[in-house]
Image (spheres, grey):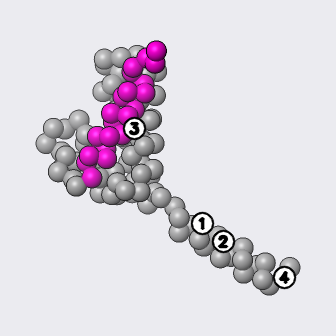
Amino acid sequence: MNKKILVFIAALCIDLSACSTENSDTYKVKPVFISNCIKQESSTRPTEQADSYCNCVADEVFSDSDISDETKNLMPTMSDKDSKLYQQNDVALVRGALMSCYTSNFYKKK
C-alpha cells in the first residue's frame, strides 16, 4: 500500500478517536440515569411513555457537548431536590432538554 494512504488512514483514526463525546465516566452514568428515570416516571404514566421520555432526555443531555461531564455525572441524582445538579452553571441546558422531551412525548400534536 502507498505510504501516503497509510498515513492518511492513521491520521483519520486518531482524529475520530479524539472526537468521542463520552468519557469513561459518562457512558456508565447514562444507563443508570435512564433506569432511575423510568422507575420514577412510570409511576405516573405508561411504561412505554416513560421509556421514550427518559431515553429522549438521556440522548439530549449526554450528546450535548455544552453540558459538562460533571453535570452529566450528576444526572442520576436529578430526583433529589438538594442535588448538586441544580447548582451547576449549565443546569438550564438540562432543563431545556427535559422540557423539550416532555413536550414531544406527552403532548399530542393537533
Look at 64% across and 70% down and name the residue there. 13
Residue 63 in picture, x, y percent from top left: 45, 50
The stretch drawn in magenta includes residue 107: yes
User: Disc 4 vs disc 3: Cβ atoms closer than 8 Å?
Assistant: no
User: Disc 1 vs disc 3: Cβ atoms closer than 8 Å?
Assistant: no
Q: Which residues are magenta?
A: 90-110
The crowding category of the residue bearing disc 1, from other C-alpha atoms within 10 Å (few below 14, some 14 to 19, many at least 20), is few
Residue 96, compared with residue 89, is above or below; it is above
Residue 81 in picture, x, y percent from top left: 15, 38
Q: CA distance from mark 3 to mark 2?
A: 31 Å
User: Disc 2 vs disc 1: Cβ atoms closer than 8 Å?
Assistant: yes
Q: Is residue 9 visible?
A: yes
Look at 41% across and 57% down and name the residue there. 65
Residue 95 occupies quadrant? top left
For this view, does 95 lie left or right of residue 54? left
Type of amino acid under label 2: Leu
Q: CA distance from mark 1 to mark 3?
A: 25 Å
For this view, does 10 lie left or right of residue 54? right
Q: Is residue 38 visible?
A: no
Q: CA distance from mark 2 to mark 4?
A: 16 Å
Residue that numbered label 4 is attached to: 2
Which label belongs to residue 12?
Answer: 2
Type of amino acid under label 1: Leu
Residue that numbered label 3 is attached to: 57
